[in-house]
Amino acid sequence: MNVSKYVVQGLGIVALGLAAPAAAEPILLDSGSIGNSYSLTFDGFVNGGPSIDGVGSALSLTLTGVQHGTYTFDYNLTNTGATGDSVRARVSSFAFNTNPHIVSASGTGTYGFTNRRSNYPNGIGKVDVCFQAKRTGSCAGGGSGGVFDGDSGTGTLSLNFGTAPSTLKLDDFFVRYQAISGVNGVTSASGRRTFVTSSGGGSSGGGSSGGTPVPEPGMMLLFGLAVVGLVFGTRRPRSQKAEAKGRLTYA
């Protein structure tokens, strides 16, 4: 029995199970969603790398109105980094995509400045809209404002679509970290949504009270290793094939 073959196959199957990603479900809204709140959590990463320990944030969005083609929200963004540890960071902006695309956007409070159709850093690429603590020329800029560890920023935001869509989808949520200290070689980072829950009977694309975890980019590497493991685990050595053929010929 070729034990190594079965070991490789077993490792491949396990890796496939670990690498299977959960879909990042969008937030779905309509006029019946007024009053519903959606809570999202974020990690921190650089250039698609693993999460940075001690860097994180949470965003709460509450739909307050749908009128004349405009969706309005209250927001609360909290920097969830521990105030007592050596890692410090400031959340300077948050961003997301919309479907359909917005015509214009505005904000008040801590994140009262907006940019549309601009690139977000760390390999994220173009986002439909970002809300910033300080005005900059693009979503990639951080400015000097935002919230530090343990603090929160609040305000309102408006998304104008010209004509109100029957259903609005919000997806691909990100945050921007500046002034990071206590992490070797890292001064700024971005954060991807890692979890979302909803209250008030709303929908997060798959249920009103459940959460949606989002896999890290490293899981794709596991998936690739799993495929390689399965391929090599199922191949028979050339000599074994020849021996089997010989036995069939002269039996």
Image: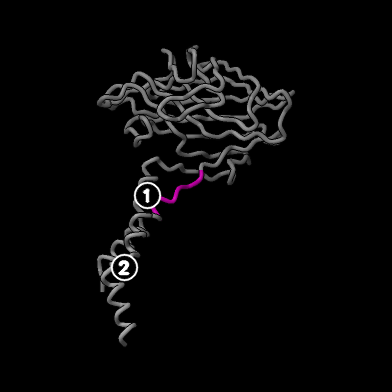
Which of the numbered marks, if any, corresponds to residue 249? Answer: none
Q: Is residue 232 left or right of residue 203?
A: left
Q: Is residue 110 left or right of residue 7?
A: right
- Of badges 2 and 1, the one in the foreground is 2
Q: Which residue is mark 1?
A: 224
Q: Nearer the viewer, residue 55 or 251?
A: 251
**Corner quadrant of residue 114:** top right
Tell me if residue 229 comes above or below residue 82 in the rendering. Answer: below
Total marks shown come to: 2
Q: Amino acid at mark 2?
A: Arg
Tell me if residue 40 comes above or below residue 143 in the rendering. Answer: below
Instruction: Inspect the magenta stretch and tell me whether residue 149 lies in it.
Output: no
Q: Nearer the viewer, residue 125 or 70?
A: 125
Figure quadrant of the N terminus: bottom left
Q: Nearer the viewer, residue 175 or 122?
A: 122
Q: Amino acid at mark 1?
A: Gly
Figure quadrant of the C terminus: bottom left
**Corner quadrant of residue 68:** top right
Span shown in magenta: 17-23
Q: Which residue is mark 2?
A: 236
Q: How was the colour assigned to the protein in this rendering?
A: one colour
SS for dot 2: loop
* Rendered residue at 32%/63% (across/down): 233
What is the x, y in percent for residue 170? 59, 33
Instruction: Inspect the magenta stretch and tell me whether residue 19 lies in it.
Output: yes
* Rendered residue at 43%/13% (across/down): 143
Report the Cα–Cα distance between label 2 and label 1.
Answer: 21 Å
Q: Earlier in the sequence, mark 2 or mark 1?
A: 1
SS for dot 1: helix
Label 2 crowd (10 A; few <14 / some 14-19 / many >=20): few
What is the x, y in percent for residue 85? 28, 27
